[in-house]
Each structure stands twice: as C-alpha cells, then as structure tokens.
C-alpha cells in the first residue's frame, strides 16, 4: 500500500500531547497508509526531542526541527513541502481538532474530487465549545472581514484544520504570504485557480495539555495578511506595518512633547528631545514585537538593536528635513514639502533598519 496521507502538525511546547495524538491518529486512520510530520520551532520544553524519539520506534512519525524561526503558517508550509503523499492534512497538536473526521475528509477528497476539505466550527454540527465571549466575537469579526474583504466563501476561514490535494497546494505555494496563524485563509486566497471545497463540521475541543500560543499579537498578523492579500503586490507589507507604527509614534511624540512642555513646563528643546527619544524607543519596541515578530531581538541584541535603530532613524530625520526644505524652497507648498519629507524619512528608516537592525538572518 503506498503512502496516502501526510498529517502536518506544527508544534511549539506541545511535549505532553505527542503520544496521545499519535495514538489517536493510529486508531482513526487504520484503513489508510499515513504519516505524521511534526514541525517544531525548537520548543524549550523539548517537543522535538520527544517527537524524534517516537519516530525511532514508529517510522510513520517524522519531525522537522527548525532553529531560530517561529510561525505556525510557515511551519505548516514546510511540513507539507517535505512530504510526498498525494493528500495532506494540517491540524493542531493539542487535540482541539477532532481527528475523528479525518477519514471523512479523505473520502471527500478522493471520491468527490474536491481540492480542499475544511474542518468547520461554524456550521450545523460544529462549535467552539466554551470559549469566552471576547474570543468568540473576535473570531466572528475576523471571519466576516475575510468574507467581505477577501471574498472568501468559507464558513470558517480561520480554521486551522483542513485537508487538501497535494497538487492543489503545489499550485498556490509560490504566492503564500506565510505570515502568522491563518494558513487556511492564506492558501485559499493565494490559489491561482478557484479551489473547490467541502466543509465538514466538528466541535473544537478543550486543549489536552499545555497552553495556547495565540495572543493579542495575532490581530496584527491578521491585519498584515489582509494588507498583503490586497495591496501587498504593490507595497511591501512590512513597510506598511512599519509606517503604521511610525504614525502611532507621531502620536506618542506629540503627547510627550505636550506633557513635558505644558505640564512639566520645560523648555521646548528639552521637551522635543525627550519626545524624539521616547517615540523612537516606542517605535523600536513595537516594530520588534509586531513587524519583525519572526526575528524578534531579545537580551543583549535588543539593546544593540535599539542603538542602531536610533542612529538609523536620526539619519532618516535629517533626510526628511533636508528633502522637505529643498522642496519648500523651490515650490513653497508646505504640506507637499512636509509629506515628501515624511515619505523619504519613512522609506529610509524602513530600508536602513531592515538592513542593519533586523537583517534577514541565516539560522543562528
Ligand atoms: N512550529 C510552530 N511554530 N508551531 C506553532 C507556533 C509556532 O510559532 N505557534 C503555535 N504553534 C502550534 C501549536 O503548538 C499548536 O499545535 C498549533 O500551532 C495551534 O496553536 P494553539 O496555540 O493551540 O492555537 P489556538 O488553539 O489558540 O488557535 C487555534 O484556533 C485558531 C482559530 O481560532 C489554531 O487552530 C489556529 O490555527 C486557528 O486559527
Ligand atoms: Mn489549540
């Protein structure tokens, strides 16, 4: 019997779920030849070591350990690319996804010839269990936005549980954004041909062991994915993220300036200097957490990064003022001159910091 299905499971600190998920896959997939590929981002709890020790005894189990990387979507993509089975499934390690529907998903793909089958929480027969109201409503809002802005017709585009034909995946892999958590949505909107799909309901269960990695930052990831899939072909998404944070930095700058000037009653130069420094620290931090989340600087590198960031942005400020002054002198429109200066400054800051503060790294 040749290999039919690869189940790709991204993992980060899922040590205590591995045995159980392999056991359950074994039970539910007894009729087909399958394998499971754990893609682990060097979890501190030793998930990769555990997965590899299971694979020594069970050749259906494989593990890709990535070093110096983070990201659910990119982990799934690498897992899928590493497999050769004609069908691939993606699911979580924590047993929140009901592995019991895998055979039905496979049947639909094989016999009904769909490109994709999605495990859906939002239809008759599915559900999200006892999520709190805020998680329920944010998931709903993200779903509606995807449906309206990206024109996705899935009931549950945020689902992380699906199975698809390898050939259909191979067609869209070149266009994937690979950002954040929303791998299904990314695949769906990146496909050059309209994917035919079927939705199978399931109940999102409680986590078996460990903790969720989904935090507030995924909202920014989601925003970036939307940007990437709409205007991303014209402007780099990271530049947009950088510019939005820059705009917030202007707000911080004005707040600090007003505070030091009016409340603390300090001289203007002092107030402006404080505002510049704090706005830079704010911008550096937010970019480190959001824009460059996948290459976040920590520890000593954080402080070195901050100094480099401030130096690069100081040059950006000079360029900004220089360009604005030249245009103002020649044409006299203050708004046009100001905006031109800001644009030059932002682009400079983005390019310079992406090269010296957050350079694309080869693995540590
Ligand atoms: N390799 C890798 N790298 N795996 C990761 C990373 C990462 O940076 N972050 C999370 N994972 C793995 C987890 O170990 C888990 O197996 C799976 O991805 C999902 O992460 P959870 O932390 O369990 O996410 P969740 O349950 O809160 O979110 C789920 O529901 C969302 C919809 O509301 C996931 O299924 C999401 O994909 C889904 O969008
Ligand atoms: Mn989970």
Image: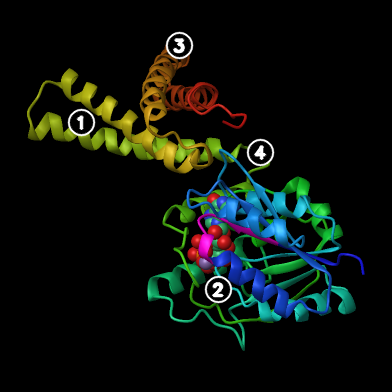
Residue named by callout 4: 234
Disc nearer the start of the sequence (2/1): 2
- Does dot 1 land on a helix, a strand or a loop? helix
Q: State the SS at label 4.
A: loop
Rendered image coloring scheme: rainbow
Query: Please, what secondary structure does the residue beneath circle 3 have?
Result: helix
As drawn, 148 above or below 291: below
Label 2 or label 4, whichever comes before in sequence order: 2
* Mark 2 lies on residue: 96
Residue tagged 1? 257
Q: Is mark 3 within 8 Å of ligand 1?
A: no
Look at the numbered disc 1 and say if its residue's Cβ is closer than 8 Å to ligand 1.
no
Q: Is 112 displayed left or right of 279 in the figure?
A: right
Mark 2 neighbour class, 10 Å CA radius: few under 14, some 14 to 19, many 20 or more:
some
199 magenta-colored = no
Mark 3, residues whose alpha carbon is within 10 Å: few (<14), some, or many (≥20)? few
Q: Quadrant of residue 324?
A: top left
Span shown in magenta? 8-16
The residue wearing badge 3 is 326
- Label 3 or label 4, whichever lies nearer to me, is 4
């Amino acid at each position: 019997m040749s290999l039919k299905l690869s189940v790709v499971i991204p993992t980060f600190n899922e040590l205590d779920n591995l045995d159980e998920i392999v056991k359950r896959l074994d039970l539910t997939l007894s009729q087909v030849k399958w394998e499971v590929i754990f893609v682990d981002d060097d979890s501190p709890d030793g998930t990769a070591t555990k997965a590899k020790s299971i694979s020594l005894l069970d050749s259906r189990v494989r593990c890709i350990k990535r070093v110096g990387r983070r990201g659910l979507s990119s982990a799934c993509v690498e897992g899928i690319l590493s497999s050769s089975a004609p069908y691939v499934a993606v699911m979580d390690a924590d047993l929140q996804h009901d592995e019991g529907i895998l055979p039905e998903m496979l049947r639909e793909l094989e016999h009904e010839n769909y490109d994709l089958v999605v495990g859906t929480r939002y239809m008759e027969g599915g559900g999200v269990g006892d999520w709190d109201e805020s998680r329920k409503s944010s998931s709903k809002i993200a779903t509606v936005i995807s449906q309206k802005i990206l024109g996705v017709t899935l009931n549950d585009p945020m689902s992380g549980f699906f199975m698809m034909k390898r050939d259909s995946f191979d067609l869209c892999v070149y266009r994937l954004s690979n950002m954040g958590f929303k791998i299904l949505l990314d695949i769906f909107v990146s496909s050059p041909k309209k994917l035919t799909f079927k939705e199978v309901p399931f109940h999102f269960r409680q986590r078996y062991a460990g903790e969720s990695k989904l935090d507030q930052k995924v909202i920014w990831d989601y925003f970036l994915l939307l940007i990437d899939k709409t205007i991303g072909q014209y402007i780099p998404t990271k530049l947009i993220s950088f510019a939005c944070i820059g705009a917030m930095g202007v707000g911080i700058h004005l707040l600090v300036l007003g505070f030091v000037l009016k409340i603390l009653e300090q001289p203007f130069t002092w107030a402006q200097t404080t505002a510049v420094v704090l706005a830079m620290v704010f911008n550096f931090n937010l970019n480190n957490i959001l824009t460059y989340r996948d290459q976040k600087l920590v520890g000593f590198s954080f402080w070195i990064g901050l100094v480099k960031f401030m130096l690069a942005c100081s040059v950006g400020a000079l360029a900004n003022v220089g360009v604005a002054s030249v245009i103002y002198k020649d044409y006299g429109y203050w708004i046009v001159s100001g905006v031109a200066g800001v644009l030059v400054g932002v682009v400079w800051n983005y390019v310079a910091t992406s090269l010296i503060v957050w350079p694309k790294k080869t693995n540590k």
